Amino acid sequence: MVLPEHEGTVLSMTDSDIIQDSTAPTERRIDALLAEMTLEEKAGQLSGIPPKQIGVIPEKEMIDDDGEIDDDVVEEYLGNGIGHLTQIASQGLLDPEDAAEMINTFQEYLVEETRLGIPALEHEECLTGYRGPGGTIFPQSIGLASTWSPALVESITDSIRKRLAAVGAVQALSPVLDVSRDMRWGRVEETYGEDPQLVGALGAAYVSGLQNDGDGIDATLKHFAAHGSGEGGKNRSSVQIGERELREVHLYPFEVAIREADARAVMNAYHDIDGVPCASSEWLLTDVLRGEWGFDGHVVADYFSVDLLKTEHGIADTQREAGVAALEAGLDIELPATDCYGENLVEAVEDGELSEATVDTAVRRVLRAKIESGVFDDPFVDPEAASEPFGTDEQTELAYQAARESMTLLENDDLLPLSPEELDSVALVGPQADAGRGQVGDYTHAARFDSEEDGDFESVTPRDALEAKGETAGFDVEYVQGATMTGPSTDEFDAAEATVADADVAVACVGARSDIDFADRENPAELPDVPTSGENCDVTDLELPGVQAELIDRLAETDTPLIVVQISGKPHAIPEIAETVPAMLHAWLPGQEGGTAIADVLFGEYNPSGHLPVSIPKSVGQQPVYYSRKPNSANEEHVYMDGEPLYSFGYGLSYTDFEYGDLELEEGTVAPMGSLSASVTVTNAGDVAGDDVVQLYQHAENPSQARPVQELLGFERVHLEPGETKRVTFTFDATQLAYHDLDMDLAVEEGPYELRVGKSAAEIVDTADLEVTDTKVVPRSARTYLTETSVERVE
């Protein structure tokens, strides 16, 4: 390649050869680049740019209304190169072919028109699927967590990887590894729940599928760290937490994904921890992440979080000061645009406020990501082939499978499954019964850009699916919305009640709408469709929003059997409804195939197998009510309510019965660096096939410090035909019992432990005693994170 002329040092042929030689060692290529880069070019590599985002580039857009780039604007913002291109496909609302062409256009400019010819890392969001137009929408993360299936998660992200690669993306801002224990937080739906072991296992599977052993899309772990523990359950609010809990709960899933799955990027969280914002925490971003865990990828800023050091946290007086603080802490790339880095860093170096060596360190990480991802040597994709991996039958089937496996049956008083031949009419009511948007999570194209109304988002609603089944089976479906998602109107209550009273059975689809919401509304309680789940949608109660609970009360007064289907990304504290209705199903924002999956479960075409990844409280005032509280928190009660959740972590009903044998240990003792196997048989004692989630917990009997009442150690989803028995074996290392001692060293402690196997955290079916023979600090290289499982059929 001939490098164009540019102001600055002209590359020597030797350095040029090294830089362009794809077989040369990565670090040697980086050394050659750094040696020739100007300070402005280095700063360019530490910045991101959204090509079309009003307000980020005031009065200037790189892409005009005809989809063409403005050369002058591009030269101004990309002339020195750039680190990241921000969501060209999704924020640009581009179809796959157009997205590929536009990304190619920018990469061509960077390669051919900048002095060093360094392409950019283009990133997209993919929390529940490729976020741009045309992407398949899978269940929201909390729904995938309800499957307790790392294999399914890995299959989904392997599928997503192909679509991202087709348009030219090389990095994805997913997965979310926040541990969520305050259900008021709007972003609970984006998480894998309340338990660090479950979050870590599913997060590692997500990364593995996306990165494909280094030949895929770089995953970005977020939000580092403890983002799910903000004061008041509010997004971005301060976190007050001890180091021990921070390490053992909130840092743990990130460590698992880095050490087990080699995650290539990390995104900081917005908040502060004990007064230190994560974006400027050297302890977090450098000492722990790199020093302790050996992470060698790059750290990107959550959008605008560097600027928030000035505008929200107030620890910086200027954007330049904020940029210096973030870079020195170990935050390599400012996203989505250049506010605090760029020229601010150049001036800080020139004025002696920032070492150029610090800049070089961050640039080195970004260049390494570009070389190792393959984009440095091959930045272009084929636009004509970009649409090929989209909209395939395989993707639709996978979304359908995931939706079915995520369905969590909470109540069933012998009403389900329904027998279609016994029905003449079904009443269908509720604001989620015919809402395609209502089935999807906040980080989807459909939710963010109202694309359902634009006609390019298709989903099967419960109404669609029930009416289809009715046409086949010969029963009628009578639909009345009954109530809006939010707001006080009861205008349709009478019509809904009359419709239900005349039906053989009624299905009420209720819940909460998800979105990324930054609207400033007056009197939101009076509005009919306010999102109460998703980013910036934090709440102060956990009841069903609006008058949905009142609607259910009215319908329950009829003689018609009532099934409540919650389609929501957060749990709802509705003990009165749970006591009143004969059947209740939680659908967890099931995605584009959710309606069919719901109908399949209601009519027994699929046996529900979802298990809760969070504990559901009886009241918002009970929080926190997660299963692994310490004894004093778990045992103390409020004046008017006990301390037990409405439904426990791991809970989920089935249409069959599972019987467990005794929990058997390979040995009764284990050395602190030893390993052990525990096994249990599970039998399907019913007459229909089904899946159960076998859960193994551990409890320290006499620890030297206050410990959780129990902690998840391993789990396995197992399928059983009627009458079939299988043996599930868990193999784990004693290091998995370790916790941080009084000196904050991770240590396995001598003494008695109890292993527990159960169907949920509250339904333990058998226990076994285990003795650890000695106390030992665990070497960093010797720690094991995930329990291995095996399943064999017992004849």
Image (cartoon, rainbow, N blue to C red):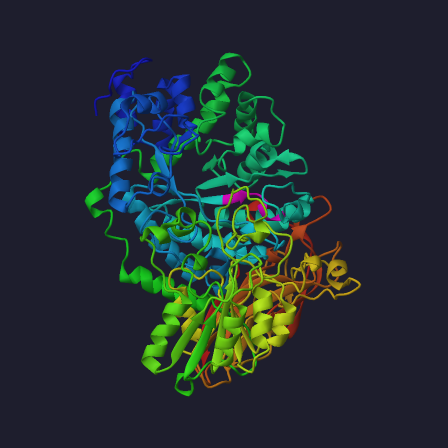
Direction from residue 83 to residue 674 in the image, left or right:
right
Q: Camera-side residue: 56 or 644?
A: 56
Say above or below: 446 vs 280: below
Question: Residue sitting at 33 percent across and 58 percent down?
Answer: 458
Where residue 62 sits in the image (x, y, percent)? 32, 29
Q: Quadrant of residue 680?
A: bottom right
Q: Estimate the x, y position of residue 661 in percent, counting from the top left.
A: 57, 80
Q: Is residue 206 above or below residue 427?
A: above
Q: Is residue 566 visible?
A: no
The residue segment tinted magenta is 222-229
Q: Can you give x and y, in whole percent of width and height, for residue 715 in the image?
A: 53, 65
Does residue 589 lie above or below 255 as drawn? below
Q: Residue at x 69, y 55 (%)?
A: 749
Task: Indicate yes or no whether the magenta region holds residue 224.
Answer: yes
* Residue drawn 38% across the image and 24% down it: 31
Where does the image place residue 214, in percent across and percent down from the top left?
A: 36, 45
